[in-house]
Image (spheres, grey):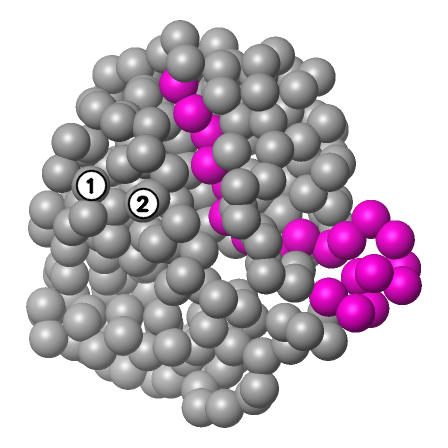
Amino acid sequence: MISTEVARDLVTRWDAQQERYAYQREERFGVVCAVLTALAVEGPVIDLGCGPGSLAARIAARVPSVQPVGLDADPFLLALGKAVYPEVELAETLVGAPGWEESIVSFGQPAAVVSSTALHYPSPTQLADIYRTLVRLLRDRGVLINADMFPLSTPVLDTVASAMTRCEPAGEDWEGWWRDVHTDKRLSLPLAARARTVLPHGGDNALSADAHIALMQAAGFREAGEVWRDGRSAVIVAVR
């Protein structure tokens, strides 16, 4: 177990270092909550690749009509989230792995699925399969919200957008956060659980928002498009 005090400090630092890489991260979280509110979503909302539950916790606080559930493959990050956000259900699942959809079904038919800076990891083929699975699992008129940093479709425009959304390096980075975690003896047990877990390799499918939208439409979503953008930072909404 991780104490609430230790976990809260680590999650606060996690959110701060994530801001180095995810331009307008908190604003995107707000857009996700606003979309759920605008569409009057009620019931289970699944957060794919939730990490320690930062987005799910904000949804719980701002959208009282839904029950957020966070899914992630990393047991250490989930342990942090469980200590800090007891109001949010968190479960260990590798999105896209064989049988992963059973984790969603166990919480009931979702009214919405959300994700933040997680769906750029699967390959295009894996992502297409994930989107087809979500079409099958979501309620009629259910919604998928993908908030991420998307490269633009042409090199020149992407160069401009990248310059607009480049975060100034400041404070702790991702490597420093994990380095400090691994030197903290209080975290040895949850880190041991993490060491026994098969985690997805880092990477980026480099898909533009247009490419994501095309995959969503091909999967069977009846509507899909951007609802917000600032440079590379954008939010895509697809409706079943």
Question: Which residue does the image show at 27% across and 26% down from the upper left?
Answer: 41
Residue range (magenta): 142-161
Question: Which residue does the image show at 33% across and 64% down from the upper left?
Answer: 191
- For this view, does 207 lie left or right of residue 231? right
- When asked about the image quadrant of residue 77, the answer is bottom left
Tell me residue 189's x, y (percent): 24, 64
The amino acid pointed to by label 1 is Val
Question: Which residue does the image show at 75% across and 36% down from the upper left?
Answer: 211
- Dot 1: few (<14), some (14–19), or many (≥20) neighbours within 10 Å? some
Kindly identify which numbered label has been placed on residue 230: none
Does residue 74 appear in this view? no
Q: Which of marks 1 and 2 is nearer the N terminus?
A: 2
- On screen, residue 66 above or below 195: above
- Dot 2: few (<14), some (14–19), or many (≥20) neighbours within 10 Å? many
Kindly identify which numbered label has been placed on residue 33: 2
Mark 1 and mark 2 in contact? Answer it, CB < 8 Å.
yes
